[in-house]
Image: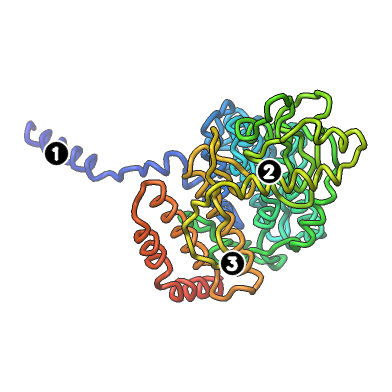
Amino acid sequence: MKYETAVILIAFFGLSQAAPIVDKRSQLLPRYAIRGREVPQEHSHNKFLDSVRTSLNLNNPDEIQDPVFGLLGNAAAAVGQGKITDTDCLHQATADQAFTNAKAAGDVDAMTDALVFAALERNTGSVGLESVLCTAITAVNPEIAALSQHQDPAADGAAAKNKAITLELAKQIASIGGDPTIALQSGTFAPGTIGDPTGAGNTCDTEDDVEGCIFSQNLLVEDATLDEINAAVAGVATGGDAAATAVATAIATDAATATAGSTCAAQVTSTVTVAAAASTDAAGCPAQVTSTITVTAAGATQTSAAGNASDATAGNVSDATAGNASDATAGAAAGTNVQTFTGALGGAAPAITESTGDRPFTVNGNTFTNIGAAVQRSCDIQNNACFNAANSGALSGGTAQCQQQQQACVAAGNAKRDNISSRFNADAYNAAVSGGSAAADNSADAEASA
């Protein structure tokens, strides 16, 4: 009997050792929860999903398990909704909390990503079926509250609805000082066939595609043109934009300083009306300005409070705007460009201007405390331009080369940050772009098979 017992124990321990080990990632994102649905596409815009995950983790009072659940159908989403009581509102609540956290950190890029996430299409049960909008909860942030998610492109009137969503998204992004053209990346796929028994449509759902398979496989259908985006942003109503004021304060307070004897902080110019960095109403301080260029004054100073007094008193906004735009441009030009990357697919990476102050690095008017964040912003802007050029047909070779260029751009910036020789920059770029043709061919094959 004792031998039988020993055999049983040996068999038991052998089975326990042979049991599969649960992957750590699956503990956070249960695969049964994110796979048990039709029309899978929650990983199509992965770069925005990842950014929102980072922001959400800064403070997550509702214990939302992961942003991916907000993009799932309700049955699967309920598993990860935490304290959110209405599953239809999980998507909005996730974006709202991520935006709140990013805003507290003064991170315009992360705020932009949260806005884009709020506008992404949710999974539904069949081609052409619209997802339910959130009505039970009002978003804390008005920028999030102004948005709704994209709808299945095969649904009735989806083209018009999705275009309106994209244009509204562009306005909200512009209001916080972000790049409004990023709104185009919130778009969805080409319409599928109503009644498709597979429910697959024209979607993709590659979980380990860092950029997002809708971009890497060139499946994105933009809802509007650049001209329409610019027109929408130019038409944003002026006056009293609290969100823009908060962002301008968070970003520009340290960088924009007033000259001796003046109580006015440097004005902020953008494609929308933005309040000055400091909300003082001292005599002679213009509270808001409007411009048709995208520049945020960073490090620019006003030479005299009286210098702007006559324009402000007379209500000559155009003169004030032109004056401050030139001041901002001159201020940016006064620094040193530390962007050494020379790749130019879709256009050169924006300059990274280094000056003095607590936020010494400036990219397209946005200021940063360290060069790493500035490099990332510069490379992201170039990457967006490259993707737009590739998707519009202006740049041949597909979007894979854009991803390679961005990686090389960031590598070059890191080399600059770590004081590595400039030769490394060139080598990193050459290594990343070598084989670009093969990558483009693979992208084309993936698109064709989709």
The residue shown at (61%, 35%) is: 255
Q: Residues within 10 Å of mark 1 (few under 14, many from 20)?
A: few
In the rendered view, would you say 181 is above or below 324? below
Q: Residue at x 68, y 66 (%)?
A: 190
The answer to whether residue 107 of the structure is visible from this angle is: yes
Q: Quadrant of the N terminus?
A: top left
**In terms of image quadrants, where is residue 189?**
bottom right
User: Mark 2 — residue?
Assistant: 296
Can you give x and y, in whole percent of width and height, for residue 311 in the image?
87, 38
How dense is the environment of label 2, judged by Cα within 10 Å: few (below 14), some, or many (20 and up)?
many
Distance of mark 3 from mark 2, alpha carbons?
23 Å
Q: Is residue 50 above or below residue 220?
A: above
Ranked by sequence position, the earlier of labels 3 and 2 is 2
Q: Amino acid at mark 1?
A: Ile
Eye-nearest disc, 3 or 2: 2
At label 2, the amino acid type is: Thr
Alpha-carbon span between mark 2 and mark 1: 71 Å
- Residue carrying label 1: 10
Q: Kindly state the secondary structure of the residue where label 3 is placed.
A: loop
**Mark positioned earlier in the residue sequence (2 or 1):** 1
Which residue is tagged 3? 346
